[in-house]
Image (tube, grey):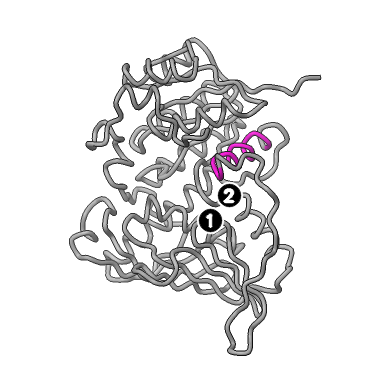
Amino acid sequence: MAEKKYTVAIIGCGRLGQHYAEVYQALPNTELVAIAEYNPERLKAVGERFGIDALYPDAEAMYREMVPDIAAVVLPGKYIKEAVIASAQAGVKGVSTDKPIAARLSDVDEMIEACVERGVVFAGGNLQRALSEVQEAASWLRAGDYGALRGISLHSWGGEISGGGCQHIAVLRLLAQAEVTEVIAWGKPEEALKRDDDEDLIINGRFQMSNGLTCPVFGEQTPYRGIDVWTDDALVRWDWGPPDIYQGFDKSGARIKVNRPYSPLQYPRFSYMATSILSFLDVVENGGTLAISGHDLRQSLEVAIAAKYSALWGSVPLALPLEDRSLTLYPRAYRWLGGDQSGRSQSYREALEDPVFPNS
């Protein structure tokens, strides 16, 4: 029998949405059947580029005519909630979205509740937590290959803690095998700390983890940019890409980098976008745990919000989950409003001709 094909609609087809379309068209068990995009020129161009005739101005118009198996919501943050809930209510099998998932915690709560109530798989998207090597390194740690965890640290967490910072928190929770239970933070510069958004905000602090470890947070430049976790014998270092593994010490006391092979990527040209989507499809088909979920996106946002308000309120300790679900942290305009509204619009020709990856 032929492998089951899932029908897929992309809701929001800017640059990242086009990347989703490229991946879904490359996979053997998915069929891209519809695109919803508010910009009529871009909608026309992307429809031509991917050979899609079912073109709609928004999710509501699409769901009046058809319900795909999978909805990929790739909208600016301001519009994600409405599209995710509409997808769940329409009866899709699974819906995914990207970071940052919202600005207000209560909005994410509503999205998750809508999906849980209807049995809809709610996946996250293009985060390095889904990179196969990150998942594999985490599995080695869970299996106890290197012994019990002794320490964790986070490096270069600044500039945009709700956007790029989501990457750090998602990987931190995975490699540490723990949740952040308390945040104490210091923020600068003062003008960035007092704004509603987090552009140029530098956060230093410490996270208390549910496994009993304390994670120092370095907001400014260090020799590294990601997450370190270590045991008595080994160090696992994620610095944007496949984690490096260090095991044992040389005569000077420095850790020795070891070459433990990772399993090869099935779709290397798409990297963690493909592994995220493959995980999503597998959970829709078979159940199980997502490489990146809507819950993971909520946890990242919640840590970012807690850090912002801890710093703003004088470095007070804030316990997670936060009681006040109305707390809000906006990302920079490009993430919140999209390129058309923030001076980074995409031309018709770019949407028609330019693949995200030239070789894809």
Residue found 51% across the figure and 35% down from its top:
359
- Which label was assigned to residue 218? none
Spatial separation of the CA atoms under disc 2 and disc 1: 8 Å
**Residue 238 in the image: above or below residue 115:** below
Q: Name the residue under label 2.
A: 131
Q: On the image, which quarter does residue 309 sit in?
A: bottom left
Q: Where is residue 143 in the image (x, y as percent from the top left)?
A: 74, 63
Between 222 and 105, the one nearer to me in the picture:
222
Q: Where is residue 228 in the image (x, y as percent from the top left)?
A: 53, 69
Q: Position of residue 248 (x, y in %)?
A: 67, 80
Residue found 70% across the figure and 72% down from its top:
146
Does the residue at mark 2 contact the one at mark 1 (Cβ under 8 Å)?
yes
**Residue 230 in the image: above or below residue 190:** below
**Residue 250 in the image: above or below residue 298:** below
Between 233 and 213, the one nearer to me in the picture:
233
Residue found 26% across the figure and 51% down from its top:
197
Q: Mark 1 points at which residue?
A: 241
Q: Where is residue 203 in the image (x, y as percent from the top left)?
A: 33, 65
User: Mark 2 or mark 1: which comes first in sequence?
Assistant: 2
Q: Which residues are drawn in magenta?
A: 271-282
Q: What amino acid type is highlighted by mark number 2?
A: Leu
Residue found 31% across the figure and 35% down from its top:
338
Between 312 and 80, the one nearer to me in the picture:
80
Instruction: For the N terminus, give its image quadrant.
Output: top right
Q: On the image, which quarter does residue 106 sit in?
A: top left
Q: In this view, does 255 lie to the left or right of 201?
A: right
Q: Is residue 277 left or right of residue 264?
A: left
Q: What amino acid type is highlighted by mark number 1?
A: Gly
SS at badge 1: loop
